[in-house]
Amino acid sequence: MSAALEVIMPRVLVLHTGGTLGMKGTPLEPDVFASKLQDSVPELAQIADLDTQIVANLDSSDVGPELWTDLATRIEAAYDDYDGFVVVHGTDTMSYTASALSFALEDIGKPVILTGAQRPLTALRTDARRNLADAVELATRNIPEVAICFDGLLLRGCRTTKGSARDYRGFLSPDCPPLATLGVDVTFGPHIRHTTRPLKVDSRFDPHVLLVPITPGIEPSMLRGLFELEHLKGAVVVAFGTGTVPTSVRPLAPVIAEGVAHGLDIVVITTSSGRVDFGLYKNSKPLEDSGAIPGGEMRVESAMTKLMHAIAAYDDPFERRKYLMRDIAGEMVT
C-alpha cells in the first residue's frame, strides 16, 4: 500500500510595513494580519505556505533608512528558510525601498517582491487582492531580483518610480521593460538577472545626502550654499537632457567641482528618458572635469538610495566612487 504523496508548497515570508493595502485597525497584529490575508485572498493558500511578520505599520511617507535596514536584516536572517519574500508597502515611497533593498541585498538569489495597493484590502473594487496574489505567486518563481509587482506588471525595483496616485497602474519603469507581465499566462522578460555569486548583505545607509534639481536661471551661489550645509556628505544633481548644466551663463560646474574637492560625492542623473553621457554635449564636459559621477539610467529613487548606501558602506573615497559607477542591480543600464 502506497502512501499519498505529500505536496510540498513553496515557502514565502510576507513582511508587512504598512500602507494602504492593510489599512484598517490600529495597531495591526501578526495573527490578525495573517488571518485577514487568508480570509480576503483565500487563493494564497493554494500558491504558497505563508508566514507573516509585522515589521511596521507606517504610512510610507514615514519610511526611511531605519526600515530599509530592518527589512534587509530580516530577509538575511530568514534567507535559508524561504523560497521568496513579499514586502507589503505603501506606494508613496515603495520605489525608494525597492531600490534600497536592491543595494543592501547584492547578488540576491531569491525573489523579493514589493507590493501594495491604491485601495485597502477590505474595500470594494480594491486592487489589493490581485496585487497580493500576483506578488506571492511571483515570489515562488525563479526571479532572483528585488522587484515591484503592481497591476499585472513586475518591474525591476531599482528602475521604478511612482507614476500615479489615482490609477491602479501606479508605477513606471522608464527605459526598462517589465520583468514579467501577468495576464492569462505569465510572460517573463529575457533581462531577468541571475547570479552565481553568494548573497552579500550590507544594510547600512547614511541619510546625509541632498537632491538638487537644476532649473533654468539657478544661481551658482545658491548651489554653493547647499553644498556648504553642515553634515552634508553627498548630493544627487538632476541635470538636463543627457547630463548638461548651464556653462556660458551662470556656470554651475565650477561650484560642483568645489563640492567634489571638499569631499562631497556628487552623482548626476537626468529625468529624461535615456542615460547620462558626459561626452555627448559641450555643456556636459565641465561636469566630467568637475569630478562628478555620471548616474547612467538611474532615477531619483535609485540614485539617492545608492548614494546613501555607498557613503555608509565605503570609507575610502576611491572605493566609494568605484561602487557608485558600477552597475549593482541593473540600475545603471538595462
Image: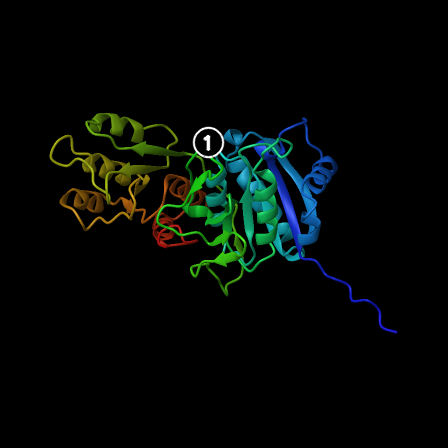
Is residue 107 visible in the rendered image? The answer is no
317 left or right, relative to 87: left
Residue 11, compared with residue 223, is above or below; it is: below
Question: Residue at the location (26% across, 33% down)?
Answer: 214
Q: Nearer the viewer, residue 307 or 193?
A: 193
Question: Residue at the location (49% across, 63% down)?
Answer: 195
Residue 229, compared with residue 285, is above or below; it is: above
Locate the C terminus and report the quarter of the image it occupies: bottom left
> According to the image, label 1 marks what residue?
165
Is residue 92 visible in the rendered image? The answer is yes
Residue 171, compared with residue 222, is above or below; it is: below
User: In the image, residue 308 lies at what x, y percent?
Assistant: 43, 41
- Which residue is situated farthest in the right direction here? 1
- Which residue is situated farthest in the bottom direction here? 1
Q: Amino acid at mark 1?
A: Ala
User: In the image, residue 155 lies at what x, y percent?
Assistant: 46, 48
User: In the image, residue 196 lies at what x, y percent?
Assistant: 50, 65
Locate the N terminus and report the quarter of the image it occupies: bottom right
Rate crowding at label 1 as few (under 14), some (14 to 19) or many (20 or more) other CA atoms within 10 Å: few
- Which residue is situated farthest in the left direction here? 248
SS type, badge 1 = loop
User: In the image, residue 43 lies at what x, y percent?
Assistant: 68, 48
Question: Residue at the location (73% across, 39% down)?
Answer: 35
The mark total stands at 1
Colour scheme in use: rainbow
